[in-house]
Image (tube, coloured by chain):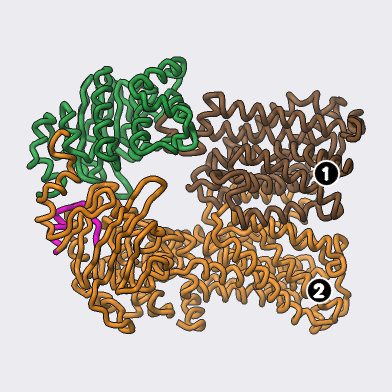
Amino acid sequence: MSLKAALRASLAAHPVMWALSALSVAAPFALDSRYYQDIAVMTFLWAGVACAWNLYSGYCRRVSIGHAAFLGIGAYTSSALFLNFGISPWAGMLAGGLLSVAAALLIGGSTLRMRGSFFVLSTIAFAKILEVVAVTAKGVTGGSPGLLIPYRPGLANMVFEGKLPYALICWGYMMLCLAICVCVERSKAGVRLSAIGENREAAESLGVNSSGTMLAAFVASAALTSLGGSIFAQYFMFIEPSSVMGMGNSVNIILLAIAGGMGTAFGPVLGSFILTPLSNLLRGGLTEVSGLHGFVLGVIMIAVLLFRPDGILPQLRIMCGRLAAAFGAGAGAAGGNARPAEAAGPAAAHPARPAPGPARDAGAAPWDGPVLELVSVSKSFGGLKALNGLSLSVREGELLGLIGPNGSGKTTLFDCVTGALPLSGGKVLFRGADISRMKPWEIARAGIARSYQVTQPFGGMSVLGNAMVGAFCVTGDYGEAEAAAAASLMAVGLSHKSGAPAKSLNIGERKKLEIAKALSARPSLLLLDEVMAGLTPTEVAEMGEIVASINRSGVTVVMIEHIMEAVTSLCERVAVLNFGEKIMEGAPREALESPEVAAAYLGAADGS
Amino acid sequence: MEQIAQVLVSGLLSGGVYALASVGLALIFGVVGLVNFAHGEYLMLAMYIAWLAYDLTGASPYASMPLNLALMAVAGYLTFRIIMARVINADHSIQMLITLALSMALQNLALMLWKADYRTVRIEMTNQVIDAGFLVISAPRAIAFAVAALASLLLYLFLQRTWAGTAMRAVAQDGRAAVLMGISLRRVYGQAFVIGTVLVGLAGLLLSPIYPVFPLVGAGFSTLAFIVVVLGGLSSVPGAIAGGLLVGVVESLAGYFAGPAYQQAAYFLLFIVVLIFRPEGIAGGRGGERRR
Amino acid sequence: MLRLRNLNAYYGGIQALRDISLDVGRGEIVAVIGANAAGKSTMLACISRAMDSFTGEISFDGRRIDGLPPDRIVDLGLVQVPEGRLLFPRLSVRENLMLGAYSRRCRAGCAERIEEVFGILPKLRERASQLAGSLSGGEAQLCAIGRGLMAAPSLIMLDEPSLGLSPIAVKEVMALVAAIREKGVSVLLVEQNARQSLRLADRAYVIENGRVAMQGAGSELLEDAVVKKAYLGL
């Protein structure tokens, strides 16, 4: 799907929001007081910056409280270049963007592996350090007194007499940020970012290089924020460290995005449209008591977070949906708050293909050995040996059952094959190639997909969006991924739910979605971890049918299962694990009737 | 040489108060799992209470300490009951944002009530010094350090020797198991929050004869407390104490060798280096963030 | 003394338990066996109020407890030793045991009870000041059961105590279960290891897909054909 197509699709999905954003440009022209025009300028600027913040923090749910640092880099770079070398702020703006890219690579790269709170704290520290630098590097930044931009109106200087040109620039900036967010939302990167935000490990198991994707988003977000910083400097014509890079700005950005709805393209815009004027009017109206407006704003924020933590936009959508339903207008802006791939509509546009094709091994060299071979694989946790020199080979096209009592190491084995856990010893060969040292997402792209025992849906995303994550292993195109995802959903019988948010599914549907997610990656080897546990007998039978048909389509399947009827009816071969070792391998009946297996499951037969 | 000793000692003295201002944050994070960005605002609140008591009655912050700490306990309890208890199980980002909003509301509340002016508590002791041979120590700083040390010791004894303290450590390690022991999570969370608030309040009142109070005074200390706590491994109480002392010394040394402008930069740099190379903190490998 | 009537539990949209009725008498060892995910742990979670989404009646010593908060249930003397032990890894063995006696009723006699537990489990005395995280699997399980005993229970519920243990450690745990009963404490033993637990139990229930599929004396159910059906589908 091209950018144009992404915009067009978004236009169709959110006509009201697009109209509102686009038409808002008329507001400053209609208002003839400088005071209100100033509010409009601020509203557009903050909307743009909040969109830029949203691009990273909103979609992958990692809150940066240091984004004002990028605002500062932009403001100081363009101003310093202009003051010292007479370089036009338009060019300075781009230079600031580049500098922010460099800074973002540094800070983003070093914080990639940090968990939530640590990441937040390092973004604060980063902003603080830059603030200190700005205060101390007096030669360039003017130190605490700040920099004054001379009043020499002219387009090249980005200095104007009235407010209207600024309003246009800020509006343009906002629309740019919004358009970028919309395009990202409907692209490979957007789907992947959302998946990372929901569950990083599960996303990696579906071929998402989380580090790369996150870094790219962080860099883009920083660069866009930096552009806003340059505009900020030109508008106020005066910058000093705390007014640009202070914590206050960082917090303001976040509050706008949160209030509107983080992780939705229009949320930050809506947040700014409501809160920026409100905050300015409060400040203007409540002048007799300084601090009152900030206090009121803080209390409003607390109330929103306590009672409407998803923000205003999702709430608004639900209300619009109800309204539309009440007026009998089917084509409303409804669609719940599932993101991305909001509606089931686009899927219908691509007629679903029959069950997704078999392994995508077209390019791979022919291989007639075992698909998967474990050579004395060991895994220990502290002193506990979860896998103890286990060897196992899986034949092309077979459906192998992996059974054994609780705690015998079955799931650990899957984790070792998919790279989720590093091996303590031995090696894993996939089609003859050693994959023991590969990253989970590389293994997924090589053609091994898995399902999780405890289902790991990307809860806030739509069912279709969930299934799309894996599809990007095979294609880079949004439309094709959508079609592939729709086909996977059809294969497991979930097509009717594709527009629903994944968290609304019941357990049986979640198990099916788990398979569909894996299937979209077109694996040649599928690892299923207890996909039948917790299902009713009817559902078990249905699931058996699904698994069998996947296997028939040419995908090799290894399934961990405790429901023995299913194992005996589906698998031609089983391997039995106990204490991390393989104690038996063979036909299901034969294995189950063996005394060793009975002992493993039921305890020793004699009292000793 | 003497000067270096003087620099180190004054660094340690400030460090003691930094540690006290930070242990509460570590305790709340470790037990409740909450990153409290409004932590510094409670320091600000206690400073204002000390100043008000001084301004209205002339009482020194030490004399108004019991009242001050009691008010801080009430403030902590109310914050927990009205706001925090509702977001205990919410998403990390929601929790953080709500404490950010709270910090904003409290700062502005202070601005409304007391204006942006710098207020100082000028008791006689403010300018007194203890002359210990080659070292000169300001009396309020010495008292602050001594009280901070005593408070840290009491906290340690509370955590190690009492039922409530042991329960708190248990909850920090495994909330699910603690419930099976008959421990009420809500109660322990509330206790930890109140204790954390009282401790940072104590730090505030000890600082009031040394530092002026103004609405944004807490913001600076919040950042400092976060740095201290990350250095100490985020949820570790002994780690926070070590981190506080370290930051005090680093700040003091940087001020002496590089100039006062670089004091902040020095400990931010230390912070970034630690975050990158030892994200689990300097004090030990076990701390770190709890999975939720 | 423990009575479940028509217990239905819901878990993520599905019904995990269907009409479970079960009794444990005074001084009895009752085993609940069944394959993985049959609903055994869910049942214990309902009893201890670790989960709320259930309907039905749970009474203990003749009084309804299905509306009580978890700490009150422990206070009444109904204690669960959870699956996976859930010790506090960075507290010492002694502190772990102490926390077992956290409920107000038991705090006073805590020191004597620790001695009593050390009397039954001399191995733990040697390890008293070690961190619980450093115990081996078998020792950790004994410590977890010891911690449960600290609450002076009249009924103790053990969830998969033999999980992941070596055969020797399993024997040790089972011997401990028998010793607990000798002290007059009733035991509700939830196990996958059917043969060992059935041999020990006075009565047993087999749970399949969230319902009671069979019940009877332990020795009756020990007939391999019966349990093999439940576990291996043979």
Q: Which residues are magenta?
A: A558-572
**Amino acid on which disc 1 is placed:** Lys
Query: In the visual, does A153 lie left or right of A604?
Result: right
List the residue tagged with mark 1: B115
Number of the front mark, 2 or 1: 2
Q: Residue at x 28, y 22 (%)?
A: C180
Helix, strand or loop at label 2? It is helix
Few, some or many residues within 10 Å of mark 1 (<14, 14–19, 20+): some
Q: Chain of mark 1?
A: B
From where the camera sits, is residue A328 visible?
Answer: no
A238 or A161: nearer the viewer: A238
Residue A538, quarter of the rendered image: bottom left
Residue A248 position in % (x across, y down): 72, 56
Q: Nearer the viewer, residue C95 or C23?
A: C95
As drawn, the label of residue A79 is 2
Subunit bearing disc 2: A
Q: Residue at x 67, y 72 (%)?
A: A102
Q: Colour of chain B?
A: brown
Q: Colour of chain A?
A: orange
Residue C198 picture location, percent across and down: 16, 33
Q: Is residue A560 visible?
A: yes
Determine crowd level at label 2: few under 14, some 14-19, many 20+ residues with C-alpha closer than 10 A. many
Looking at the image, residue A349 lies above or below residue C207: below
Q: Residue at x 73, y 78 (%)?
A: A95
| Chain colored green | C
Does the magenta segment cover residue A130? no
